[in-house]
Image (cartoon, coloured by chain):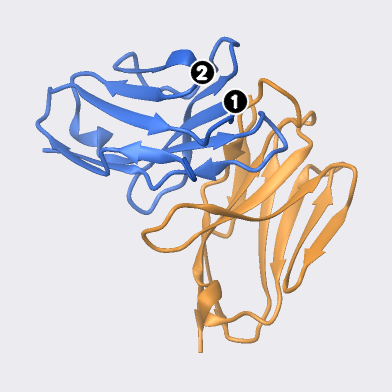
Chain colours: A orange, B blue
Amino acid sequence: GENVEQHPSTLSVQEGDSAVIKCTYSDSASNYFPWYKQELGKRPQLIIDIRSNVGEKKDQRIAVTLNKTAKHFSLHITETQPEDSAVYFCAASMDQAGTALIFGKGTTLSVSS
Amino acid sequence: GAGVSQSPSNKVTEKGKDVELRCDPISGHTALYWYRQSLGQGLEFLIYFQGNSAPDKSGLPSDRFSAERTGGSVSTLTIQRTQQEDSAVYLCASSGSSGGNTIYFGEGSWLTVV
């Protein structure tokens, strides 16, 4: 089955800096890669996703890049703000019926002002 | 309902007892997931239901864990003979179809085994 590795496990940045979180996956058939943000004590929520027919997707201060050959994808947050502090999870699955979404172990991002 | 609903929100049980956790997915969602999140840890996949297909049980950690989904809607996760290491938040999620669609999480059921 699919296995997703995520690094780093913790990341501390200054407000205004950029943050990058990287994930690798094992199943070359996976083609859907969402990112979830979980604030303390709350449920995870989708912030951005990418499918294997594109290499990069951007939404305001966040962007995700995908390298299918290397089987890795990354989350980029620019101009970080204290409210970006949370745990971020990457995930991977096949974009078809019958496949589960498998998550990485998460990255705790701390943005200090 | 408007979102994924889980009950109970908190459960304290004695070691060795059985517990049942309930998930009511978003109306019309065909896919339903159970994940486990231990304190400060990641989202551990447990089981996945998609429509009338056989569930993917590959993440269940032991035969003490089971889940069913009745009528393609409500799901119950059962943990038999609970152990202290079962203490965690059990998160249910649903989506319109498997793979490629946003999954929406419930608030979770906090289980503490004493």
Identity of the residue furthest to the bottom in this view: A113
Please name the residue shown 62% across and 40% down the image. Answer: A4
Q: Position of residue A53 (x, y in %)?
A: 90, 43
Q: Which mark is residue B56?
A: none
Q: Position of residue B114 (x, y in %)?
A: 11, 38
Relative placement, left or right, of A33 versus B93 is: right
Q: Position of residue A96 (x, y in %)?
A: 75, 26
Q: Quadrant of the N terminus of chain A?
A: top right
What residue did someone put label 1 on?
B30
* Viewer-nearest residue: A111 or B103: B103
Query: What is the chain letter for disc 1?
Result: B
Please name the residue shown 84% across and 49% down the image. Answer: A67
Q: Secondary structure at mark 1?
A: loop
Please name the residue shown 29% across and 17% down the image. Answer: B64
Identity of the amino acid at label 2?
A: Gly
Q: In the rendered view, tell whether residue A61 sits above or below residue B104.
A: below
**Mark-to-mark CA distance, 2 and 1:** 7 Å
Q: Are marks 2 and 1 in contact (CB under 8 Å)?
A: yes
Q: In the rendered view, tell whether residue A108 sits above or below residue B59.
A: below
Q: Position of residue B36 (x, y in %)?
A: 40, 37
Please name the residue shown 26% across and 33% down the image. Answer: B86
What residue did someone put label 2 on?
B72
- Tags 2 and 1 both on a single chain: yes
